[in-house]
Image (cartoon, helix red, strand yellow):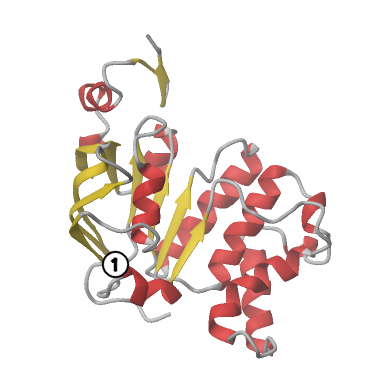
Amino acid sequence: MNTPTGPALELDEVTVSYGPAPALENIGGVVGPGEAVALIGPNGAGKSTLIKAILGLVPLVSGRITVLGRTPAQARREVAYVPQADTLDPEFPISVGQVVLMGRYRRIGPLRRPRAADRRAAGDALEQVGLADRARHRFGTLSGGQRQRVLLARAIAAEPGLLLLDEPFNGVDAVSEQALLDAVAVLKGQGTAVVVSTHDLALAHLACEEVCLLNRRQYGFGPTRLTLTPDRLRATYGGHALELRGDRVIVAHS
């Protein structure tokens, strides 16, 4: 991976609409190489929509997204994505190692066989998430947290300049959570920029330098310690974030 010299991600007054009402309106911010930004907001706030826009999967009504100095479509080979729930059927007979090797396909090409370097990259990625000993196990036999670690390993194997994570910590055990955090830290140290959607404020503090507060529009984008304030969070959650218990937003629905 060639570390970019400029910003890894630039959002310039990004507006996305699926109909008459905008799903996202005038979102802006910059993420540099080796930096991470947490997308925080209620369900339906547009976090997943923003990730899809960065991937070039939804059109913009207005504004501009620049990924690694190019358009999202042009940069797609250098962007890796870990979704909330993967489309892989747990019953499908595919090994953990084969899942991770999928991360190399854009580099290999559709008609070429994996090379030794590709298999090494997949093995190193599994090592990085602490699952090297599960390479021959069937993917569907792993726990939910372990499967999420495998999907992150698949993304690591792609050697991305930008990594997008959509609620990666939902429902994972403490061991998997720490393994995910450690792997993200290593990627950042290698110059990979990270965008992570999460409801967990503690994880935002641990993994991210910056936060983008979203609820269709932007309520803050900046350093984590300055942006994750009770007043900004209450504004973001529409007045329903009545309690900050520890490091989590407790939302009371009216």
Mark 1 sits on what residue?
8
Vertical position of residue 226 compared to residue 101: above or below: above
- Could you tell me which quadrant the C terminus lies in? top left
Residue at point 53%, 52% (across, down): 83
Percent across and percent down for residue 166 are 47, 48
Quadrant where the N terminus is found in the figure? bottom left
Q: Visible in this render: residue 217?
A: yes
Q: Residue at x 22, y 36 (%)?
A: 227
Residue 80: x and y in percent read: 48, 65
Name the quadrant containing residue 8. bottom left
Q: Is residue 223 visible?
A: no
Give percent across and percent down for residue 192. Answer: 39, 66
Label 1 Cα neighbours within 10 Å, binned few <14 / some 14-19 / many ≥20: many
Q: Between residue 72 and residue 134, name the one nearer to us.
A: 72
Disc 1 is placed on an element classified as loop
Who's the residue at 42% across and 31% down the image? Answer: 43
Quarter-wise, where is residue 150 in the image? bottom right
Mark 1: amino acid: Ala
User: 48 or 166, which lies in front?
Assistant: 48
- Between 129 and 65, the one lying in front of the other is 65
Q: Does residue 8 appear left or right of residue 115 in this picture?
A: left
| Residue plotted at (48% across, 56% down) | 184
